[in-house]
């Protein structure tokens, strides 16, 4: 038993060795347990009021489930093998920083007042919850996070694997950011497939979130029930597939430099500012659909199940440029402010069509 007192806030416990085994630890200040590459074990409990520093090749559940005021920063350096925190209550009031030489797997990591940062070879984590920023980085594989919560910023990035996030919550009322980036891997935001979408697969934002999804070599899949902020930038060389079930959806720029873009919009309005694709692509909306500008090297189909189709906006010079056939299908009417350029144009509208005179179409 190591007890550095309670109440004054100036106690400290520090233990260094090649592997550590203790009965219990208590301090009204800082606690440092440095086990080299060996196991760090505490039989009963760790009570800490200030900073908490852990180094070792493995940690018992009690070491990873501290009690006390926990007002400082928690730094964990896993020096050997994988870091498995399944069953541990990893919660602290200050910043939490985890670095692992192998994979990081487990349940929740929660900071009540600070940031959460995880860096490992790869990761499979149920939830990361912080106040300022939440960040998970995989150095040599994929990183899958079930849910991430923060005020300012959420970032999942990988090098050599897929970047996956099931649910994002940005609960600050100001500007915030969500970034999913994969080097040599795919990006998945939301459910594993369109058919697996549930209400938990959502982008929840109390303010205006800048959403950036990108892959250097792979594809991007977005399968959400709802997105309360625009999807500002989506770019990949592979196919980009987007499905959002309900509410309005706004997309800034969606780009597939080597494949197709397929968007299935919600029951309400769908707005796409820029669509760029190398292969034949499609936009299917439930309500009114607005496509401001597009550049597609093959065919493009745009459809609304219950509403109309709108092309361009109030800015002059917008163009829907399609190298192949452009197919338009609206439940109500079709209007345009952007010029349509296509090899072939097919139009079907329930209540009428208004086309501009400067369209360039070879076959109607």
Image (cartoon, rainbow, N blue to C red):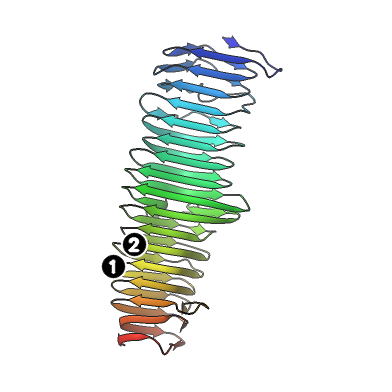
Pinpoint residue 162: horizontal percent, then vertical percent: 35, 46
Dot 1 surroundings within 10 Å: few (below 14), some, or many (20 or more)? Answer: some
In the picture as drawn, the residue positioned furthest to the right comes out as: 8
Q: Nearer the viewer, residue 328 or 53?
A: 53
Dot 2 surroundings within 10 Å: few (below 14), some, or many (20 or more)? Answer: many
Please name the residue shown 36% across and 65% down the image: 262
Q: Would residue 256 appear left or right of 267 to someone viewing this image? A: left
Pinpoint residue 90: horizontal percent, then vertical percent: 52, 30
Locate the N terminus by quadrant. top right
Q: Is residue 195 visible to the viewer in this orientation of the structure? A: no
Q: Is residue 3 above or below residue 151?
A: above
CB-based contact (under 8 Å), mark 1 and mark 2: yes
Q: Would residue 212 appear left or right of 95 to someone viewing this image? A: left
Locate the C terminus by quadrant. bottom left
Q: Is residue 59 above or below residue 126?
A: above
Q: In the rendering, which numbered label is found on residue 256?
A: 2
Gap in angstroms between the C-alphas marked 1 and 2: 8 Å
Q: Is residue 97 visible to the viewer in this orientation of the structure? A: yes
Q: Would residue 88 appear left or right of 303 to someone viewing this image? A: right
Q: Secondary structure at mark 1?
A: loop
Q: Nearer the viewer, residue 208 or 225?
A: 208
Q: Earlier in the sequence, mark 1 or mark 2?
A: 2
Where is residue 338, by image quadrant? bottom left
Q: Is residue 94 above or below residue 5?
A: below
Q: In the rendering, which numbered label is found on residue 279?
A: 1
């Amino acid at each position: 038993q190591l007890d550095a007192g309670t109440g004054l806030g100036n106690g400290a416990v520090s233990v260094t060795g090649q592997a550590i085994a203790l009965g219990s630890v208590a301090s009204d200040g800082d606690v440092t347990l440095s086990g080299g590459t060996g196991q760090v074990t505490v039989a009963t409990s760790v009570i800490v009021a200030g900073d908490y520093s852990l180094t070792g090749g493995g940690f018992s559940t009690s070491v990873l489930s501290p009690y006390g005021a926990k007002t400082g920063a928690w730094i964990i350096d896993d020096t050997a093998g994988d870091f498995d925190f399944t069953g541990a209550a990893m919660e602290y009031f200050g910043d939490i920083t985890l670095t692992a030489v192998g994979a990081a797997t487990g349940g929740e990591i929660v900071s009540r007042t600070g940031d959460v940062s995880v860096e490992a070879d790869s990761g499979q984590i149920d939830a990361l919850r912080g106040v300022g920023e939440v960040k998970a980085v995989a150095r040599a594989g994929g990183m899958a996070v079930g849910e991430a919560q923060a005020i300012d910023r959420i970032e999942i990035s990988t090098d050599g694997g897929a970047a996956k996030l099931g649910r994002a919550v940005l609960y600050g009322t100001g500007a915030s950011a969500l970034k999913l980036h994969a080097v040599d891997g795919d990006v998945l935001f939301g459910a594993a497939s369109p058919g697996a979408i549930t209400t938990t697969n959502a982008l929840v934002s109390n303010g205006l979130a800048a959403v950036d999804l990108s892959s250097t070599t792979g594809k991007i899949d977005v399968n959400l029930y709802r997105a309360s902020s625009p999807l500002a930038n989506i770019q990949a060389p592979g196919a980009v597939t987007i499905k959002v079930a309900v509410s309005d959806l706004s997309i800034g720029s969606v780009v597939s430099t080597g494949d197709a873009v397929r968007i299935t919009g919600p029951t309400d309005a769908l707005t796409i500012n820029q669509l760029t694709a190398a292969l034949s692509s499609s936009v299917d909306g439930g309500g009114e659909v607005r496509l401001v500008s597009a550049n597609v090297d093959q065919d493009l189909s745009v459809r609304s199940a219950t509403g109309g189709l709108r092309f361009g906006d109030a800015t002059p010079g917008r163009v829907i440029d399609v190298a192949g056939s452009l197919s338009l299908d609206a439940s109500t009417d079709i209007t345009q402010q952007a010029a349509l350029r296509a090899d072939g144009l097919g139009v079907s509208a329930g209540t009428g069509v208004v086309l501009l005179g400067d369209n360039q179409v070879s076959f109607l």
